[in-house]
Image (spheres, rainbow, N blue to C red):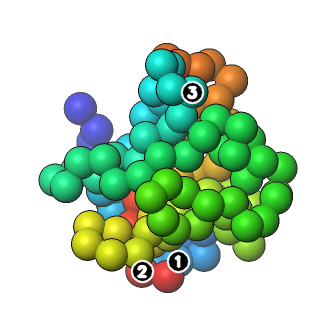
Amino acid sequence: MISPVFRFHLPHLFWFLFGCSVLWKVGRLKPDPVTEQLRVIIDGPGEIGRISRNDARAVLDREEGIEIEPGGTVGLSLSGRGVVIEIPGEGGGRFVAVAMKVWNMLEKWPRKKAALFEGGY
């Protein structure tokens, strides 16, 4: 179990990494080994999008204009420490995953997952 002290300081870590106030965990990026895609899963609504494995690597290589199925965009944050996923419509929004976690997930495919966060920017 995580100590209350760690939970208190966790928002400060995200402020340092992403330059925002507080981020809340709202879902995860989960690999799908059958289709070679990353599933964007939000707690509650479920899966709201998919990114191909090659597109996820391109995002980490700072390529721009990457799209997500069924609509939306994926890109690297200005600091380069976060992968920003923007999905319009019902259940969508702007989500951030730690870039190092996404890289680790791609390297250790399909065993690892990455958390998705939403918060004040």
Q: Earlier in the sequence, mark 3 or mark 1?
A: 1
- Asked whether, in this view, residue 85 is left or right of residue 100, the answer is left
As drawn, the label of residue 120 is 2
Whether residues under marks 1 and 2 lie with C-beta atoms below 8 angstroms apart, the answer is: yes
In the current view of this chain or complex, which residue is farthest to the bottom?
Answer: 121
Q: Which picture quadrant has residue 45?
A: bottom left
- Asked whether, in this view, residue 77 is left or right of residue 112, the answer is right
Read off the residue under disc 3: 36
Badge 1 element: loop
Please report the residue visible at 43 percent of the width from the left and 34 percent of the height from the top.
30
Q: Earlier in the sequence, mark 3 or mark 2?
A: 3
Three-letter code, disc 3: Glu
Please report the residue visible at 49 percent of the width from the left and 82 percent of the height from the top.
121
Three-letter code, disc 1: Cys
Please report the residue visible at 61 percent of the width from the left and 61 percent of the height from the top.
67
Separation of marks 3 and 2 at Cα, in angstroms: 32 Å
